Image: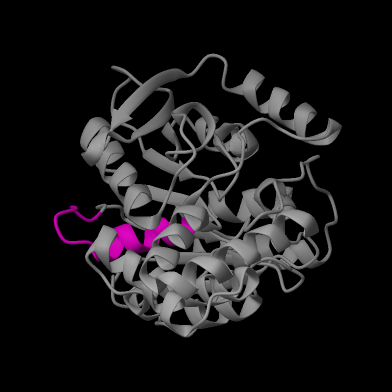
Amino acid sequence: MANFALEVTRLGFSALQAVSPDLAGRAAFRLFCRTPSPRPKGARAKAAHAAGAARLAGAERFTLTLAGGAKAHAYRLNGGARGKRKRFLVTHGWGSSAEYMAELISMLSATGAEVVALDFPGHGGAGGRFLHMGLAVGAIAAAEERFGAFDAVIGHSFGGAALMVAASGLLAGVAPVTCERLVLIGAPSEMRWLFTDFGRMIGLRPAAQAALENEVHRVTGRRLDAFDAGNTAGAIGRPVLVIHAEDDKEVSPAHARRYGAAGGNVRLFWANGFGHRRIVAAVPVLAAIAAFLAGDLSEAGAACESIKKDAEIIPFFELPARRAAL
């Protein structure tokens, strides 16, 4: 938030929580879940968005209706009656959309696989300005129901965390995604730090902070501490490739280390030098993902190791700065 807007927000929450911490917590949750404008800001973002849109111009488009009436949007490449082939799902981060994942989507579709790319509620073609983890997991379940089981799912940042929550079957009444492999790129392993930082930023006192966190339970049926993908990554029993950069300034590399310690099914590779955003379009990262999806862990490791030596990247963009990790 800009300094003036933040000061006004803090003053407002200071007054509201003095009257009712519960109301302040509920209002804070609404603010927390408000998504950025989908319109790209700045010349680089506009150019990247336009380039991504051009890559997706030939894709089929679908609207997925979630419980409660929220909408998700999906692109599909290589769909229809094309014979037996792999099927992959791609999810984006907070403030992003499928257009900004177009290099990864193009790489996957070039293998001949059917590729489905989601725009979560509040993002891209989905419309709206509201998203929380429950809605994201619901969108993933709706995609599997519409298109069928996925051989692998690949997600960046918040999208990666949502895939891990979906794969673990954490939410009651939402079928777990039945993929064979997962790829998490710059993904957080748990969510408490985001709520703590957000509450501190807007000046919530303990009672209002507790009310904010209780909203997570109200809308998902699970307490905030249950959203700990670092503890479930090993338990899902499927190969997981975690790619992260130690220079990621938006999602601490500690999250990747927690994933890496979760179990023998998790492979952790460092994409140092690519930060939080450029990482999804880095050529060596795309090569590592392709090798992992083909079932060759040794080639995936070699490709990721080459990141330290190969500085080539595909021109990328600047995502909206506000909580890009979520």
- In the image, 1: left or right of 220? right
Say if residue 74 shows up in the picture.
Answer: yes
Which quadrant of the rendered structure holds the N terminus? bottom right
Q: Quadrant of residue 71?
A: top left
- Residue 180 position, x and y percent, is 31, 55
- State yes or no: residue 164 in magenta: yes
Which quadrant of the rendered structure holds the C terminus? bottom right
Q: Is residue 149 above or below residue 200?
A: above
- Residue 179 position, x and y percent, is 30, 52
- Residue 257 position, x and y percent, is 56, 81
- The structure residue drawn at horizontal position 51% and vertical position 60%, both measured from the top left corner, is 184
Say if residue 190 shows up in the picture.
Answer: no
Question: Which stretch is magenta?
Answer: 160-176
Q: Is residue 268 above or below residue 310?
A: below
- In the image, 145: left or right of 140? left
- Residue 190 position, x and y percent, is 46, 74
